[in-house]
Image (tube, helix red, strand yellow):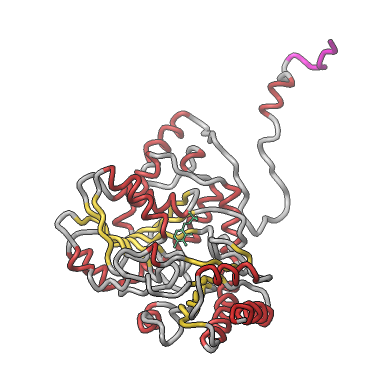
Amino acid sequence: MPREPRDSHSPRLATRLVKGGTSTPVDGGRAVNPSVVRASTVLFDTMADMNDARRRRGTERLFTYGARGNPTAFALEDVVAELEGGYRTRLFPTGLAAIAMVFLAYLRPGDHALISDCVYQPLRHFVSTFLEPWGVSVTYFRADGSDAASRMTPDTRLVYAECPGSLVYEMCDLPALAEIAHRHEALLVADNTWGSGLQYRPLTLGADVSIMAATKYLGGHSDVMMGTVTTTEAAWQRLATMSDAQGAAVSPDDAYLVLRGTRTLKARLTMHERHALEIAHWLTAHRTVARVFCPALPDHPGHALWQRDCTGTNGLVSFELANASNEAAERFVDGLSLFGIGASWGGFESLATVVNVAKTRTREDWHDAGPIVRLHVGLEDPRDLIADLSNGLDALEA
Ligand SMILES: *Cc1c(COP(=O)(O)O)cnc(C)c1O
């Protein structure tokens, strides 16, 4: 066996493979973007440094172990905290994981939670498969918040809103809801995925906690999953402690992708909004369309609140078909050529799907509504998108 040439003081190859190449000092300037720092173990110079970091990491943001975050994720946390106008932010592998962590952090068996009727549907599944069996009772309140005060109980610890709501974008009066929650010493949590921190900012309207599925507009390119939770200073510690206890962390590569998406968030949303409004107005005038759902339209029931609290709209537009069966609506979506068929949204591309609003509401009855199509209007030329929709609606009539 050939021997490695070595003098008596230099480490052997196996040792050098481990010890070499760990620092990359470079002369010159620096990159615009933060590095992707992949790490499980984090090294300290001395035991005293390590012990000191361990003492402080429960309350301070320190790089001490991969499961407690990494510098790339910290950079994204700072951007999201800024967007939301909050104290600090934690990142989770998906939007749904972020939502679940909020309930785990702030509720205990015996507590009661009040949840908006228009929430993202999988939250109801989390409620029935975990929260209720765990001993937390849940009541849903009307999407406009009108019955929230009357549904508070002495055990209500958390009020959960989504504004605008999923699928048809109901608005509620968030400052009024905050007042109701705080009067009962409950926290107000808002799902801010629709607003993305640009069009809507729940923490500035009285919420204690704001959640976003960064999977949608923050990522913006349909290639990464992530959830964010941002809180006020008072609400922070319980979230941080529970996240650490459960080892919740995101990869630096995913954090990098979302961070890159946030750089163009404003530019993309401005364009999504412009295209969506053009299509919404066109749909409103079409004879096969019964109703168009978009809070920026004057006839939307939440329009006044949208005008008061939002700074814009996004690419989401839903519409109800007049005199069409569900099968016809599905055929219409199948026939579109520029809209992908898919449930998520927030990427650069257009999507269409038939949604079942009746199945996702228990406080309001949507069974008499016609079939509802949800569009996510992307960055394509809206004239092409309108031509595609127009062909589809003509075929529906024929
Ligand atoms: C998509 C979505 C979520 C969940 O995000 P995932 O990353 O898909 O888990 C939560 N809330 C709303 C309003 C959403 O649209």
User: Which residue sits furthest front?
Assistant: 398
User: Which residue sits furthest right?
Assistant: 2
| x 50%, y 48%: residue | 93
Q: Position of residue 356 (x, y in %)?
A: 45, 65
* Image position of 204 (left or right of 222): left
User: Which residue sits furthest left?
Assistant: 154
Q: Quadrant of the C terminus?
A: bottom right
Q: Position of residue 74 (x, y in %)?
A: 50, 51
Q: Is residue 131 magenta?
A: no
- Total labels: the figure holds 0
Q: Position of residue 25 (x, y in %)?
A: 69, 44
Residue nearer the viewer, 318 or 186: 318
Residue nearer the viewer, 130 or 213: 130
Residue 339 lies in what quarter of the image?
Answer: bottom right
* Image position of 394 (left or right of 157): right
| x 45%, y 69%: residue | 167
**41 in relation to 338, above or below:** above
Q: Position of residue 250 (x, y in %)?
A: 52, 46
| x 63%, y 77%: residue | 392
Write down the region rendered in magenta: 1-8
Residue nearer the viewer, 246 or 36: 246
Residue 3 lies in what quarter of the image?
Answer: top right
| x 48%, y 79%: residue | 312
